[in-house]
Image (cartoon, grey):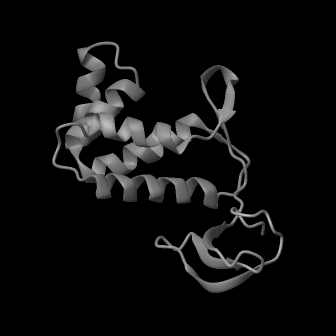
Amino acid sequence: MKCPYCGEDNTKVIDSRPAEDNSAIRRRRQCEKCSKRFTTYEKVESIPLIVIKKGNIREPYDRGKIEAGILRSCHKRPVSYDQIAAMVEDIENTIFNTEQKEVQSEEIGELVMEHLKTLDQVAYVRFASVYREFKDVNTFMDELSKLLK
């Protein structure tokens, strides 16, 4: 590891511990030339994931899109950001645990809807109205009747 201060290649690890979320290892290092200390994070390289959208358009997976959709549907609802972050983490873990290189956007949408249904029913209906592209009141009522059963 190169020292960010002097560019020397020789650095030693002083301390090593899991990062706050246990998804990385935090290492304190010291340069053997200039003696300055710095922190590095070591993280497991994840499999690149491609999302197949409608019309077979492929794009790289973006966690932010899931989070933004959930945040929009939970706007002004009694749902904390921690609950949303935990939901996004759970959805992401489910997606990556399939170990597939490509995933249909519909699968992601259905996972989001499953989680929202148990978290907040109003947020669920909001998300469903956009995700399922409700065309009229009847399709909206059909979704509500499914929720009420």
Residue furthest out toward the bottom:
14
Say if residue 90 shows up in the picture. Answer: yes
Image coords of residue 39 (percent x, y): 60, 71
In front: 61, or 26? 26
- Determine whether, in the image, residue 140 is placed left or right of residue 45: left
In-front residue for pair 7/67: 7
Left/right placement of residue 64 relative to residue 105 reads left
Q: Would you say 133 lies left or right of 59 here?
A: left
Question: Along the line of sight, which residue is nearer the eye, 43 or 40?
Answer: 40
Q: Nearer the viewer, residue 43 or 13?
A: 13
Q: Is residue 149 visible?
A: no
Residue at x 20% of width, y 38% of height: 122
Instruction: Identify the residue at horizontal 73%, vertical 67% (top origin).
Output: 3
Q: In this view, which residue lies farthest toward the top?
A: 136
Quarter of the image that includes the N terminus: bottom right
Which picture quadrant has residue 29? Answer: bottom right
Q: Is residue 92 above or below residue 73?
A: below
Question: Which residue is located at x 34 percent, y 13 percent?
Answer: 135
Q: Residue at x 43, y 52 (%)?
A: 88
Q: Quadrant of the C terminus?
A: top left
Tally the marks: 0
Residue 121 at x, y percent in the picture: 22, 43
Q: Quadrant of residue 142?
A: top left
Residue 110 vertical position relative to residue 28 in the rendered view, above or below: above
Whether residue 82 is situated above or below residue 58 in the rendered picture: below
Q: Quadrant of residue 43?
A: bottom right
Counting from the top left corner in percent of width and height, residue 15 is at 61, 86
Name, please, the residue furthest toward the front. 34
Please say if 41 is above or below 77: below
